[in-house]
Amino acid sequence: MAANDFPSKRAPFYKDVPDEQWFDWRWQLSHRLNALEDFEPVLELTASERKALSSGHLFRVEITPYFASLINPDDPNDPVRRQVIPTDLEMARFTGMMEDSLSEDAHSPVPGLVHRYPDHVLMLLTTQCASYCRYCTRGRIVGDPNATFTRAELDAQIDYIEKTPQVRDVLLSGGDPLVLAPKLLEDILTRLRAIPHVEIIRIGSRVPVFMPMRITDELCEMLQRFHPLWLNIHVNHPNEITKELAQACDKMTRAGIPLGNQSVLLAGVNDCAHIQRKLVQDLVRIRVRPYYLYMCDLVEGGGHFRTPVSKGIEIIEGLRGHTSGFAVPTFCVDAPAGGGKVPVMPNYVISSSDHKVVLRNYEGMVSTYEEPLDYKPHDPTTCPYCQHKRVEVGQGGVFGLLDGQQMTIKPEGFDRLHTRGGGTHRLRMDSDKWKPLGIGDTGREEE
Ligand SMILES: *Cc1c(COP(=O)(O)O)cnc(C)c1O
């Protein structure tokens, strides 16, 4: 195992803490740093941090002693420090800032359940985390100890999933599901597993990163009873990859849990292709597959972390081809107002004709792919999967155009605008004149 290749750190202030306490997650949780005085013995605060910590209005601060130990106390710009210790830059407002920039609450049929995509839902189980990221996308609900989800709300979430057969994948998030009381988490997993149409369960958690000691054998034994269960962690910088994290990931992968990583592109933390390359290479060494690299959301307090979108394109340019393909995450902008995740990447298609595509590779070499001149299109009338798709629930979209489900997607009010205030007149009477004779390539009967 690669664990010994990664450092184990403990800030000098904690050197006399007995191992039984240091490696006990309950001790880590109850010794988190949050007030000004807690920080003083561990590192020297800057004026900006001091101002932020004494303002009293900020998004919640909590840092486990383990995670605080990863900070180089002499570096005010330390990439771990910047993720968890607030500065007064958090108080800055910026164009586009929103409380709920992804419109999650608008996509929630019941509180805490976000049903944005056709076949998978996001279930928010708690508002609590082991530590709090300064750029939290859910700062509007996360952190408040008096505003977590009630039993009745969790019941309503499960009830919705039970009644919605199109949901085959349930993503548990929050807050952090792994800070829930183990019995409650087990109870929720049991109830989800009892729903026949729920094929997979996913957990999104930063607990392995903030508090790897929480990943005990007992927890892994519990989780592995609910397979297929996948888990995504959240690492942003190679300095977060330690011996302890490597051991926690090893335990989880041995319990059969496939691990992924979601990171956020953050100015001053990881906005560099070289840092990102080291990050993804170290992740795959601990058997964690880089999954997404997110653009930082337009949330309060997050303005100073934002980069141009092109920084993400540059990073993918620096990864694809330059390192193992499975180490390259998908760079995504989670588009505001409920636009959802939009993948963004460099352009590799340079040109095309009716039988050639001109491509460039990561080295800038330009080459041509000759396309077949005798391609026989896939026949949906004999394909059992195409025959099935009618019962599957999709949301159309651009694929719906290709698939022959519809011919256009129109902006709201398009038809009304284009009548230009005129009424129905003799040339507009015949409504069938806009009805195509089928919409191509589906083999589907006309309706
Ligand atoms: C990110 C997200 C998911 C999961 O999306 P995947 O692309 O399947 O990882 C589900 N629901 C919401 C609302 C999300 O933001």
Image: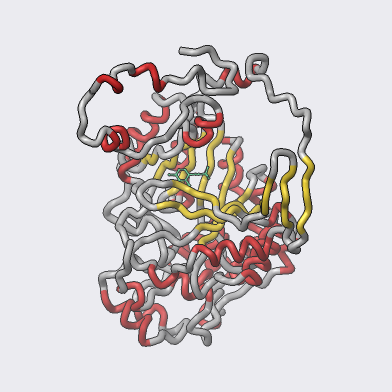
Residue at 44 percent of width and 46 percent of height: 340
Residue 115 is left or right of residue 271, and the answer is: left
- For the question of whether residue 196 can be seen, the reply is no
Would you place residue 137 above or below residue 218 in this image? Answer: below
- In what quadrant of the picture does the N terminus appear? bottom right
**Could you say where residue 4 lies in the image, as x and y percent from the top left?**
73, 67
Would you place residue 139 above or below residue 417 in this image? Answer: below
Would you place residue 225 above or below residue 79 in this image? Answer: above
Colouring of the image: secondary structure
Residue at 27 percent of width and 76 percent of height: 55
Residue at 47 percent of width and 20 percent of height: 436
**Could you say where residue 7 lies in the image, as x and y percent from the top left?**
67, 72
Nearer to me, 158 or 348: 348
Would you place residue 17 above or below residue 162 in this image? Answer: below
Residue at 64 percent of width and 17 percent of height: 384
- For the question of whether residue 135 can be seen, the reply is yes
Residue 353 is left or right of residue 266, and the answer is: right
